[in-house]
Amino acid sequence: MKRTDMKNHHKHLSIIFSIVLIGVFFVSCEKKSVADTWQITVSGKVGFAGSGAITIKDWADTTSHVETAAFDETARTYTKTLTLREPGFYRIFFFETQFVDFVLNKSDITINIDESGRFEVLGSPEMEIYTKVDAMRTAFQGSEDVLKLNQAFSEAVSRNDEEAIGKLQEEYQQLVGVSDDSIAAYLIGQSPNPAVIDLLNRNTVDKDRNFSAFEKVAETLTGDWERYSISRDFKLMVEKGKLTAVGAKAPEIALPDPSGKVIKLSSLKGKYVLVDFWAKWCGPCRRENPNLVKAYQRFGGEKFEVMGVSLDRSREDWVQAIAEDGLNWVHVSDLRYFDSEAARTYNINAIPFSILVNPEGVIVAKNLRGAALHKTLEKFLGQL
């Protein structure tokens, strides 16, 4: 965790709610459907000056088909009825000068925009879910515990007290975990809902810590939900996630080492193995390597091994980084970047990423970095 992360953690949520989720709110009040389609109406009032077309575009429509709303220039109101087969992401353009992103489901909605460009979305029950989660995050960031930690963190940084910084970061992550647990419990308690899917897809809560929440939500997506792409994609993501969830058997990795010899993860069975996905070009990976070296020097041997899985593209870069960082453990790679066989198997879309596998080949922890790596290894291997 970077030193600035403690103050900035979850700041992206406020950005999501004020910019990215501009009107991205699903709705659920059902209308009568015909042949698995239904009609909804988008309407509203425009408060700023302008003339021309008000258009609506489905982001998933690769044909670039655009719907044009009827606009009453005198009343400054617009309306458009759309036929849908499933919930979808849309963007409404006001005279090509302003736009609002939103998601449609089965309710008519009203999107009003005033003279300054501020908007409101009405008729969308799911908005309460987004608002509730945002309020929970805001309350967390403004809590007395977090404010005290932030103050102590700033003081530790000014003193360049690395030990204190590490401890404070660990305390903060523990508080984040408790906050995530509360949000996950809230989301699980909702009925099948596009807003819940959207928030989980955005990693509003830590997926590794709260993977059971993803599973429980996926289990509720039955009936009509089974034919919606947003639901199918979510359930597919959850199924893939089960492969590398804590408690799952670690999928096999069989890739060549720098000499060309194929090394299998299963060949290290009998030890705790940290499978570390990294690359020479990955700054955060390289910054974490000294910490991993210390852990290996402390715990490496008969009970603990590291398997570094590089996502580099060239052998020269890969071998150079191994030497520069002093990474004296098992290394494998097929030099195919994120198309690596191992990266696809483990659904890697960002690095650094690591899993800890026990001697029986079962995943017991994920994404261990900094002090958390040493603390977890102490838990399983004891103090050394």
Image (cartoon, grey):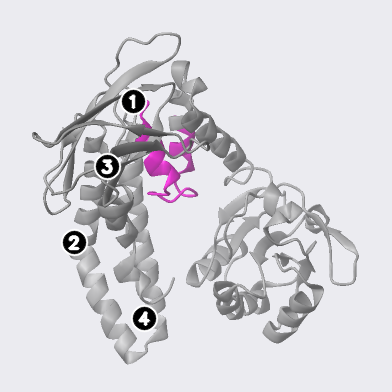
> Quick one: label 2, few (<14), some, or many (20+) residues within 10 Å?
few
Residue 164 is tagged as 4
Q: Residue at x 29, y 28 (%)?
A: 27
Three-letter amino acid code at the position of disc 1: Ser
Viewed as shown, does residue 44 lie left or right of 370? left
C-alpha span from label 1 to label 2:
29 Å
* Foreground label between 2 and 4: 2
Q: Residues within 10 Å of mark 4 (few under 14, many from 20)?
A: some
Task: Please report whichever mark, 1 or 3, sits nearer to the chain's N-terminal start.
Answer: 3
Residue 199 included in the magenta stretch of the image: yes
- Alpha-carbon neighbours of circle 3 within 10 Å: few (<14), some, or many (≥20)? many
Q: Quadrant of residue 24?
A: top left
Point out the residue furthest to the bottom here.
159
Q: Which region is colored magenta?
A: 191-216
Residue topped by disc 3: 23
What residue sits right under mark 2 in the picture?
142
**Real-space CA distance between mark 4 and mark 1, rounded to the nearest whole angstrom:** 43 Å
* Element type at mark 3: loop
**Residue position for label 1:** 191
